[in-house]
Image: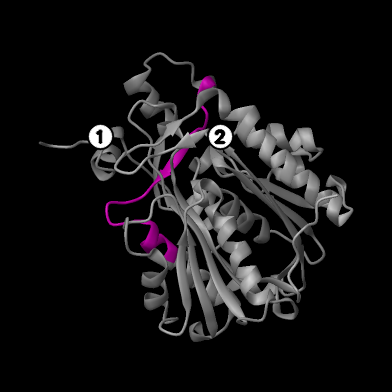
Amino acid sequence: MHKIMKPERPVGIIGYGAYIPAYRLPAEAISKLWREGQDRNHLPIREKSVPGPEEDTITMSVEAAQNALRRARIDPQEIGAVWVGSESHPYAVKPSGTVLAQILGIAPAAVSGDFEFACKAGTEAMQAATAFVGSGMGDYALAVGMDTAQGRPGDALEYTAAAGGAAYIMGPGDEALAVLEGSFSFVTDTPDFFRRAYQKYPEHGNRFTGDLAYFYHIRSSVTYLLEGLQLSPKDFTAAVFHQPNVKFPQKIAAELGFSKAQISAGLLSNRIGNTYAGAAVLGLTNILDQAKPGDRILMASFGSGAGSDALSFVVTDKIESARKVAPGTADYLNRRKNIDYATYARWRKKIVMK
């Protein structure tokens, strides 16, 4: 049996926060331009979130982290580490984490850096934050999963490449609103999705994307985690899986033995698309917004290249008071404004004048 990962002392989530841009681009607007006449039933999602012209991974991380701080009720300078996971950091050389730490009042006495493991960069940051606190190197650590993803015009990825994410403050278990039971990570060298330096848009490896990448890695991480914790799907109140579209998370959930009711709260892709590093961690915020003490929650991310992190949390009685002090995920889901493809293309700099 593979050994699951547990911190040396109890660690959990003491604060969390979501952020989703207000703007939405309907999938039909993309289809009308590039694939006119396509059956709407074959579109991968209904609509996706789009960052405004002044929004990027850092600005969105600030708002999500401020929500997490409100729920954690701690002095920002008590946070000893800041890590931001994203595929779309604003700078190629200059960390997003240091900017975030400065804005939030955490700097200068802190560790900071960025993670870039595709769509699982957010859970990767959470694991690093858990290890930091669990080892005793610090009492609190901030982990963010956030993206302003882009797809090549007309490509299948353009339908789902969206924006948004979440922030988590990890801290001592006795202060947590959800305590981590354990985690398991599963990685291989699988070229399902990649982008070389100086290449603007990512490429996907077609036949590698489904069975050999997404399903194989999530199936493995979740199976090994459940075996290590001696749990089964029926022991969980809710579960959230990485959601590149609507069908994939539903298929892997059913395969592993999770019901539609268990994944309903975390399944947001039809309303906002695939927020990449923010997808699984954002779904977890919506579950926490509705969770009750004693609920057990599974989160399983997937990152191309490829790997999956599976984590199990148990909700404590601190959840009730924590969620009332910051906007809920539903607040961001429900504040929406449609834009057309031309506006989207201009904002995302898909039109280049030479």
Q: Residue at x 82, y 38 (%)?
A: 257
Closer to viewer: mark 1 or mark 2: 2
User: Residue 261 location, x and y as percent?
Assistant: 76, 42
Q: Residues within 10 Å of mark 2 (few under 14, many from 20)?
A: many
Element at label 1 = helix
Q: Which mark is residue 342?
A: 1
Q: Residues within 10 Å of mark 1 (few under 14, many from 20)?
A: few
Element at label 2 = loop
Residue marked by disc 2: 245
Residue closest to the far top: 37
Q: Marks 1 and 2: CB-CB under 8 Å? A: no
State left or right for residue 195 relative to residue 345: right
Q: Residue at x 48, y 35 (%)?
A: 193
Residue type at mark 1: give it.
Answer: Ala
State left or right for residue 152 relative to residue 278: left
Residue type at mark 2: give it.
Answer: Asn
